[in-house]
Image (cartoon, grey):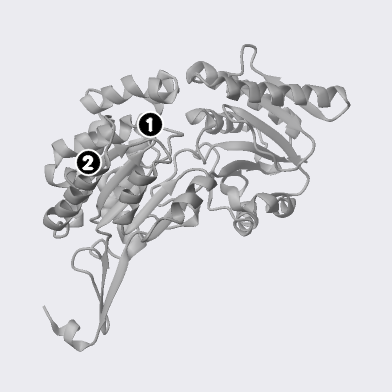
Amino acid sequence: MSQLSASHLTATIDQLLSAHERLLVTRSVETIATSLDAVVARFLTPTSVEHQEAVAGLPTETGLSPEMIRHTLPLLFATYRCDHLLRLLQDELGSSDALDEGIRLPGKWRKAYGPSLVTQVLAGNIPGAGLDGIIFALLVKAATLVKTASSATLLPTLFARSLSVVDPDLGACLAVVTWPGGHTALEDIAFARAEVVVASGAEASLTAIRTRVRGRFIGYGHKVSFNVISKEALTTDVADLARRTAYDVALFDQQGCLSPQLVYVETGGVITPQAFAALLAHELHHWQQMLPRGRIARDASLAIRRVRDDAEWQALAGEEIVLHASSSGTDWTVIYEADPTFAPSPLYRTVRVKPLDNIARLASLLQPWRPYLEAVGVAAPPAKREAVAQILGQAGISRICQIGTMQTPPLSWRHGGRPRIADLVRWVESEGELVMSSS
């Protein structure tokens, strides 16, 4: 992308607001969802230009391996089909007509309105980050200005270009731009006229943005996820459980907020937590053959080596720690630690396994991390799963799911515990018989 000037950004916002008024306000939600579905279908079609350009360009841009990009691209887009989008509207707004004709209730009429302009500041940790926000904003009839990370422009740009081909009117309501972080003049322009600003990133960045937003602000900070395995789940299918756990760790090279960094294994099962760590190491080796880890920066590799060295020194000092590591480089690392204290990892397929003598202990173990917790993959029988879910929900967890599905959440996933569509709209309610009797 070429260098963006203040005058160009101002003109872009003028065009977005004009397109919103002319082309988007009177559109039906169903026609918008249909056009978005057509774009998604292109990315899901291996022979399409969009799919081929993404597969060719994303390994270089993201550092993920070509095998990982080919595997994850369908996972990124499959959830945004038309029927899924309309069902989400129904679930969160009470009716898919809430943004069109509104909802008639006894004695009142209620209608949802999307913002005229949503400005979105995207993170660049994994491909597709922020794609959901773009789709949701357009779905609620909001013109959308997207500021990408300078290192992650390809997928949002391809999506905007495809939308302009499929539906030029809807495409005119989406603009993708970028500039170096901390460019105050451009940020002031981008934030000043937006009714809603949605941003993802580090807490310091979100705090800096929040203070400069005139409208509503929705922020998504960095989060930590993990797994919990009950003793009853350590059955004859434990190898499959280890493989699904390793899959969650390996996907996107553990860069997402839904990537598990730690696995709690309850003691008293058929195998010990330490034995499960060995199985997990074996399965991470398997996924390294299937979905090789991509390139990583030197400082990230050094961080992994420091964690490995620390584990080895503690083991030599008599601590109950076992290190499992890839034979070459830092491709994957499993560290079994008897100390159950919650601790994140340096990522890039580095995971800790810790024993848990009683799952109820999670409440105290998680307390210091409460503001940063996002999702937990749970393996437990139905009779125990509800009790585990209660503990995790009270601890601040937003999503509880099956192990093996952590990186593929449903569209209804409430990121950070917040609704995806309902957070964007405002409601107007008109009361009285006059409204009810009108056609």
Residue at position x 52%, y 41% in the image:
257
Q: Nearer the viewer, mark 2 or mark 1?
A: 2
Residue at position x 27%, y 26% in the image:
51
Disc 2, SS = helix
Q: Which residue is mark 2?
A: 8
Q: Which mark is residue 152?
A: 1
Q: Nearer the viewer, residue 385 or 82?
A: 82
Q: Quadrant of the C terminus?
A: bottom left
Q: Which residue occupies the extreme top position in the image? A: 328
Q: Is residue 238 above or below residue 131?
A: above
Q: Earlier in the sequence, mark 2 or mark 1?
A: 2
Residue at position x 52%, y 36% in the image:
404
* Dot 1 amino acid type: Ala
Quadrant hosting residue 335: top right
Across and down, in percent, residue 243 comes to 57, 28
Residue at position x 22%, y 22% in the image:
47
Disc 1, SS = loop
